[in-house]
Image (cartoon, rainbow, N blue to C red):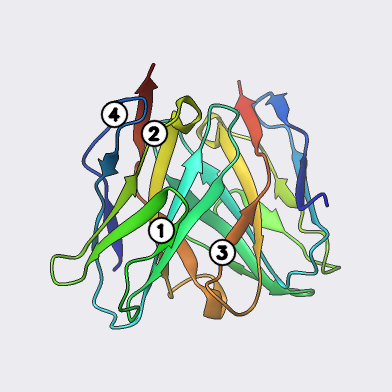
Amino acid sequence: AQKITQTQPGMFVQEKEAVTLDCTYDTSDQSYGLFWYKQPSSGEMIFLIYQGSYDEQNATEGRYSLNFQKARKSANLVISASQLGDSAMYFCAMRDPHYGGSQGNLIFGKGTKLSVKP
Amino acid sequence: NAGVTQTPKFRILKIGQSMTLQCAQDMNHNYMYWYRQDPGMGLKLIYYSVGAGITDKGEVPNGYNVSRSTTEDFPLRLELAAPSQTSVYFCASSYETGPEKLFFGSGTQLSVL
């Protein structure tokens, strides 16, 4: 069964610095997708970035990039030039094809709380 | 552009009461999902639907029911509420193809006392 592990319950970063949020995953599937979502204190879930297992390039979306190391089964999120508005919970997720039809259910890690210091 | 709309935002129930959480999306997505998020945890799938008239169980379906009579609406019914159902509930929808990004509603915070 698929599993997502986020080992950092909380992280601090100074404004304007870069930060890496760790995510490791476990799956026996050859084709899979990895996602990162942001959850601010207001509670909504905001999609940040997606990486497919066959994508050769690491995904990037503005200040977000995904450091995808397939052999190590890691999919770390890198946020460059942190801003105060980046303070939030961050969830790593991957698709579980056992639920959710062909789209698959998303299995989430427990999250990392990022706090950006001014 | 409303996206995914959930109501209510907050609700307190007494043990044994029932209620329906409403979810509507205006993006013509066929796929819709209900998740729950317990404190300090990630989200877990309760039920999902791949189109009008089609629903199926997720990881944690016990104590819940759903229906999908239209593409737009996907209500979640709690029968005989229990304290274990105290959680934040998220509705989400997605396209059929592409990177399958989920669009989430803003959540419903439910307390069962």
Kind of residue sitting beneath label 4: Gly
Spatial CA distance of label 4 from label 3 is 25 Å
Q: Which percent across, then down, holds residue B74?
A: 76, 58
Q: Residues within 10 Å of mark 1 (few under 14, many from 20)?
A: many
Spatial CA distance of label 2 from label 3 is 24 Å
Q: How crowded is mark 3: few (under 14 residues within 10 Å), some or many (20 or more)?
A: many
**Are labels 4 and 3 on one chain?**
no
**Are labels 1 and 4 on one chain?**
yes
**Are labels 2 and 4 on one chain?**
yes
Secondary structure at badge 3 equals loop
Which of the two residues, A86 or B86, is positioned nearer the viewer here? A86
Residue A107's label in the rendered image is 1
Left-right relation of B35 to A77: right
Q: Which percent across, then down, holds residue A67?
A: 26, 59
**Are labels 1 and 2 on one chain?**
yes
Give the labeled residue for mark 3: B101
The disc, 1 or 4, on the residue closer to the chain's N-terminal end is: 4
Secondary structure at badge 2 equals loop
Q: Which percent across, then down, holds residue B4?
A: 74, 51
